[in-house]
Amino acid sequence: MPAMMKAAVFVEPGRIELADKPIPDVAPNEALIRITTTTICGTDVHILKGEYPVERGLTVGHEPVGVIEKLGIAVSGYREGQRVIAGAICPNFNTYAAMDGVPSQDGTYLIARGLCGCHGYKATAGWRFGNLIDGTQAEYVLVPDAQANLAPIPDGLTDEQVLMCPDIMSTGFAGAENANIRIGDIVAVFAQGPIGLCATAGARLKGATTIIAVDGNDARLEVARKLGADVVLNFRNCDVVDEIMSLTGGRGVDSAIEALGTQQTFEQGMRVLKPGGTLSSLGVYSSDLTIPLSAFAAGLGDHKINTALCPGGKERMRRLMNVLESGRLDLSLLVTHERKLEDIVEAYDLFSNQRDGVLKVAIKLS
């Protein structure tokens, strides 16, 4: 009988449960990681609700922090027992997309065997954990193309400090990187969930000198201040478009970052842009978007709309951990709750219903 492990699996819409699964064997180019800490992402909640289709029985989760348990024979430069992370996006860097400079888009379209209602296809890009292969909310996870995707954790960093690197930090920073921010710019960041907070921090590191954070939760807006926001606006208390246009003297912001994935935040981001400004879109959308004619200046406003999927690979992870190791940013304050793997169902309820001031839940396995 194969050795078994505990794993959180997608059962059906509305049900993710803990189950027993075999510990996977390791192929030559793979690595088996014993998970020490992982977390729940907003995308996992989309899976839970049935808004993003995955196969039943799939282990969910895509943010691994752990220790190398076993290395494939083709993987060199690492050792068993070494602390590592791997990005939520696991490109192999041999695809057309990777060689064309967009490794996050490794394998962008896959026939979904009728799992989604979009003519047999779904966008996957390089997102494999908890999407195309078993994910990280388990005692062990198999890392594909491990030579390209394992990143050693510096000795001075804790699991909680690096927990945001595989997805949340990488995604938020990609939003800032794609926003064409220049030193001295004014940037508005719509939604201050974990990704929006990382986008706020990224905008500051990119050189923006006025960062306007928008959310409906005052506690999250206070965290945004700690991460670099200069102005915070609660959309429950004001018309944020009017307020931002007033703050900028009618000029509009140089860049807007949309970090929620709704028509309202996307449209607000468009309406506060200056002519020639950039809207950087990070949200995962679950319905069609409409671009408002006036905000888009009928297509004559020289606007740019950029989308982003968090870059993966060991070099991206190394750079993110460099930022943390330098002391320029501490994202451990985003980890507001801690649960054991056996409490994963309750952790999903806590996170998906945004109870008790939750930002991120650290799922601890050791």
Image (cartoon, rainbow, N blue to C red):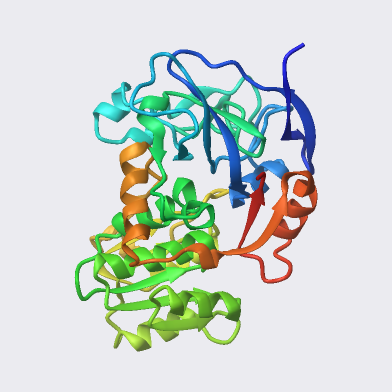
Residue lying at the far left in this picture: please name it.
183
Q: Is residue 246 left or right of residue 40?
A: left
Q: Using the image as rendered, state which of residue 46 and residue 242 is in the foreground.
A: 46
Residue 161, compared with residue 167, is above or below; it is below
Q: Residue at point 52% right, 80% down? A: 222
Q: Using the image as rendered, state which of residue 266 and residue 215 is in the foreground.
A: 215
Residue 243 location in percent, x, y?
A: 43, 86
Residue 43 location in percent, x, y?
A: 59, 47
Residue 59 location in percent, x, y?
A: 67, 32
Residue 267, compared with residue 131, is above or below; it is below
Q: Residue at point 42% right, 73% down? A: 227
Q: Residue at point 67% right, 36% down? A: 138
Q: Is residue 134 visible?
A: yes
Residue 247, compared with residue 331, is above or below; it is below
Q: Residue at point 50% right, 65% down? A: 265
Name which quarter of the figure residue 274 lies in: bottom left
Q: Is residue 255 visible?
A: no
